[in-house]
Amino acid sequence: MTKLAPMTGVQTSVNNSFKQRFIRDFKLNRLLYIMMIPVILYYVVFHYAPMYGAIIAFKDFSPMKGIMGSDWVGLQHFRDFFSSYYFWRILGNTVLISVYSILFMFPAPIILALLINEVRNQTFKRVVQTFSYMPYFISLVVICGMITDFTNSNGVINTLFSWLGYDGAAMLQKPGLFRPIYILSEIWQKIGWESIIYIAALAGIDQEQYEAARIDGASRLKQMLHITLPGILPTITIMFILRMGNMLNVGFEKIILLYNPVTYETADVISSFVYRKGLLEFGWSYSSAVGLFNSVVNLILLISANYISRRVNKTSLW
Amino acid sequence: MHAETGLRNKIFDYTINTMLILLVIVTLYPLLYVLFASFSDSAQLVANKGFLWKPLGFSLEAYQSVFSNPGILKGYGNTLFILVFGVTLNMLLTSMAAYVLSRRNVMWNSAFTLLIVFTMFFHGGLIPMYLIVKGVGLIDSIWATIIPFAVSTFNLIIMRTAFSAIPESLEESAKIDGANHLTILFRIVLPLSKPVIAVMVLYYAVEKWNAWFYASIFLKDRNLFPLQLILREILISNSTDSMATGASSADQFMIGETIKYATIIVATLPILCVYPFVQKYFEKGVMIGAVKG
């Protein structure tokens, strides 16, 4: 036993008042608390102070008067936002991009993992994995630069589609093409990386099941669909619920790099709108209100996803 | 019967291999295109439409422009600064906090954990964040890209989990010898956690390398711009003009195209060369993260 045990033992703590425990704990763990000070300070200043600062959503913030001194306007900014033309547009875009991502992007790495799992030649397997992870390490700015360039009127992707009858105009200038470009490039960049988790799960499948299936004469395709896929289903479910909880967290940095006024109608999402209204047009309070709306909806979605997951799946974040 | 299954299996194998080879081609070709284009003669490249299977002509003009561009060199320098000091600060704070939170019998630990984890699920928003960074006087300081991102909650939780898994008995003897917590952290816990430290350093480094958004709102002085912001100017806002100085405007456009590709290569090649060597750490990181959910 440690020499600390008697101090924190159950018998002695019964007749300890909170104050005594507090003092004893502090004497014992003083250095730990000192080590924690910078981190707590960091969280207070850069996470909790902005939460407090979010009250400017209910004020008419002016940099002169500061957060405290600005005048209260109540729910004015929220009312303005909900009744504005932009509300349905950016909410719709956010949800659509999210839903399309889930529909098309979510299954892609699972399929890749299943395919990689069937490869018998270890060297080939390694090569495929290494190359498919690669785009993940190219920075977002460079990826978006490549997208812009390839889809431009002289770009290689644009040319490829002109051979198939496309009219050849810069693709990022067409509102109808924004979402496909966004999602396909997302798949291109992340399919390999996101398959890692499923490949790891595949390693845990009991090999005897395959043996039994082979004796029964099941084809490889059947084995894949009836043993491999169910084997990683728990992992798939967890990833899916986590993804659902992130519904309104669209990768807005990528959107800001790719969109332009012509494509706002399909590309503008809540967070890009907050950025534009707040930091480019200085509507501090209004855009804080929009941002706060986003944060609250996210929190509700996450709590719901967690609740459903706990009920259905017996797995949850808390 | 047996021969038939054999044939079916063969077809299955061929189908899968073909699909994966296609995937590798689709993944690699855009990168090869950029590489070929960057070495191409600018006039020939602009005239060309469609695929490239080798550089058109051969010219190092674009690379000369890139390497003589003060913005790119300065950007590289700034990013290097952010990487070195940023990741050091990240690791120092994250490992200290992870150590404290992995101790048992610390009265305030559950309160600390709640305080920290809550920030993963709720945040004040972009504008209040900007106002705070402005309020503490970091606007237009390179530290604005470092200090507000000093700890990643996700990484902190991963590290705390890893530290909790270290058997207590290993620390006991040091405790009896009178070692304090800092000594235990730096002499015992950290040396025992090399794999997780490697993963954390890589995660933080990638985050810093890629970051451009907050730099774009916190920094106005071009001399402080990290590489990614310079890249944004060149690749997305199309401002290669300053690099192709002394050329006519038509020439500037043509040279501009090859400069873009050369810039991509210069900014990406170092990462892609290092990456295969650290790949296994990343894979490990995904799995550590996954266990936590």
Image (tube, coloured by chain):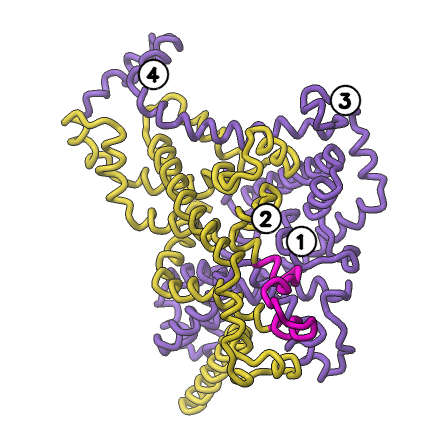
Chain colours: A purple, B yellow
Q: Which mark is residue A72?
A: 3
Q: Mark 4 near mark 1, Cβ–Cβ under 8 Å?
A: no
- Looking at this view, name the residue that lies furthest to the front: B246
Q: What is the quadrant of the N terminus of chain A in the image? A: top left
Q: Where is mark 2, residue-wise?
A: B213
Cα–Cα span, label 2 and label 4:
41 Å
Q: Is residue A43 visible?
A: yes
Q: Is residue B153 visible?
A: no
Which of the two discs, 2 and 3, sits closer to the camera? 2
Give the residue displayed 45% in from the left and 30% down from the top.
B113
Q: Where is mark 1, residue-wise?
A: A256
Element on which disc 3 rests = strand
Q: Quadrant of residue B279?
A: bottom left
Q: Magenta residues?
A: B231-257
Cα–Cα span, label 3 and label 4:
42 Å
Q: Mark 1 near mark 3, Cβ–Cβ under 8 Å?
A: no
Element on which disc 2 rests = helix
- Residue B61 is situated, as x and y percent measured from the top left of the image, at 53, 74
Element on which disc 1 rests = helix
Q: Chain of mark 1?
A: A
**Amino acid found under the numbered disc labelled 3:** Trp
Q: Chain of mark 2?
A: B
**Amino acid found under the numbered disc labelled 1:** Ile
Q: Where is mark 4, residue-wise?
A: A26
Q: Quadrant of residue B242?
A: bottom right
Give the residue displayed 57% in from the left and 63% down from the top.
A143
**Amino acid found under the numbered disc labelled 2:** Phe
Cα–Cα span, label 2 and label 1:
9 Å
Q: Mark 2 near mark 1, Cβ–Cβ under 8 Å?
A: yes
- Residue B168 is situated, as x and y percent measured from the top left of the image, at 24, 34
